[in-house]
Amino acid sequence: MEAESDILKLERKRLYDYAWSEEYGVSLAELDCSTIHLANEDAKLYPELAKVLSEECDLYEVNMLEEYDMLTEDAKEMFSSGAEGFSPFVSTLDVHVRRADNTVLSVLYDSYYYNGMNDGRRSFWGGNFDTETGKEIYLPDVVTDIDEFAKVVEAELFSTVGADVFYS
């Protein structure tokens, strides 16, 4: 029987802003960014993970704010040159926690960016972090037989999605 894992206590931090144009009576750009930190109690228990999350949060927030400033300026420029059918420019980042216990923290980031071109761009990426050390965990760190792992993943995909979707 496995030992029970303690669930980490996390705090979500959210940045939200929008640029409104009085001159044109429209929203030019929108920023929506969420990140996570360890709550005070767990930050004391797992200081290395708390440090990694804090650094990651700071990096994402700075990048998102810079991107938002650029989108706002681009939207102003577009309006000054006679934009028609304008939709506000958007930059979002949302973090989803997949697992958070005394062994590992697994997160998924979901990003969307729209600057008036095409239908926008969506990206996903994630990370798994050792709770004690704060170090990122990679597949070879936990999988010893990659061929067997591939077979298990293939079987799971076939059973949930269907074999006709995949070639091998």
Image (cartoon, grey):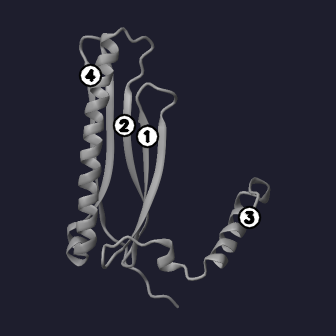
Q: In this view, does 63 lie above or below 22?
A: below
The residue to which callout 1 is attached is: 112
Residue that carries the numbered disc 2 in the rendered image: 91
At 48% from the left and 42% from the top, the residue drawn is: 122
Task: Look at the numbered discs 1 and 2 and tell me whether their residues touch, using CB distance below 8 Å.
Answer: yes
Question: Residue drawn 28% across and 19% down?
Answer: 76
Measure how far apart labels 4 and 1 are at the Cα level. Answer: 20 Å
What residue is at 32 percent from the left and 28 percent from the top? 29
Contact (CB < 8 A) between labels 2 and 4? no
Give how far apart the Cα atoms at labels 3 and 2 are. Answer: 36 Å
Q: Which residue is at a point 72% across and 69% down the rendered structure image? A: 155
The mark nearer the N terminus, 1 or 3, is 1
Q: Which amino acid does label 2 sit on?
A: Ser
Badge 3 local density, few (<14 within 10 Å), some, or many (20+)? few
Give the alpha-carbon distance from disc 1 to disc 3, as whole Å. Answer: 30 Å
Locate the C terminus and report the quarter of the image it occupies: bottom right
Residue bearing the label numbered 4: 20
